[in-house]
Image (cartoon, rainbow, N blue to C red):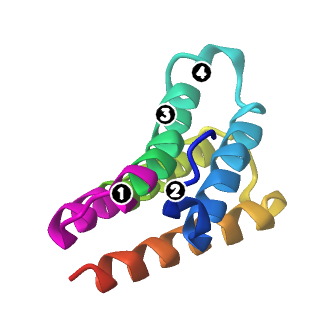
Amino acid sequence: MFLELNHRNLDAYKFTRKFVSDCYKLTSHFPPEERYHLTSQIRRAAISVHLNLSEGSSRKSLAERKRFFEISRSSIIEIDAGLDLAMDLGYFNPDNFGDFKESIINCFKYLKGLINSSS
């Protein structure tokens, strides 16, 4: 927020930042009994996507950078799996969240590109 570092200029940074907000909005519709379970898990994974992207961007070595980007991408996969469970439990209808689908796909693609460029 206060540091003017290069990660802020990445398109992926902007997408993952919005993605965190999107995850919070989507999980706000989950039942209260999920607050400390599935809701919390998805939200923590979303934060991990954004923070690992940011931290990885500051690493000097390509191998380290790639490792953080892979952790970030893995968190997206974790969220997707968590949303499968939420859908199975009837917590949301994916047809009503087309923007979210676009958001998660864009984040995954940007991270995949960053991982490939770090190889």
Which mark lies nearer to you, 2 or 4?
A: 2
> Relative to residue 53, is residue 3 drawn left or right?
right
**Is any atom of residue 91 visible in this view?**
no
Between the residue at mark 3 and the residue at mark 4, the CA separation in whole angstroms equals: 14 Å
**Is any atom of residue 107 visible in this view?**
yes
Q: What amino acid is at disc 3?
A: Arg
Q: Nearer the viewer, residue 91 or 16?
A: 16
What residue is pinned by disc 4? 34
Between the residue at mark 4 and the residue at mark 1, the CA separation in whole angstroms equals: 35 Å
Q: Residue at x 39, y 56 (%)?
A: 72
Give percent across and percent down for residue 34: 59, 21
Q: Residue at x 57, y 61 (%)?
A: 13
Q: Which mark is residue 44?
A: 3
Between the residue at mark 1 and the residue at mark 3, the CA separation in whole angstroms equals: 21 Å
Q: Which mark is residue 5?
A: 2
What residue is pinned by disc 1? 58
Label 2 secondary element: loop
| Crowding near the residue tagged with mark 4, few <14, some 14–19, many ≥20 C-alpha atoms within 10 Å | some
> Relative to residue 104, is residue 114 drawn left or right?
left
Give percent across and percent down for residue 31: 71, 23
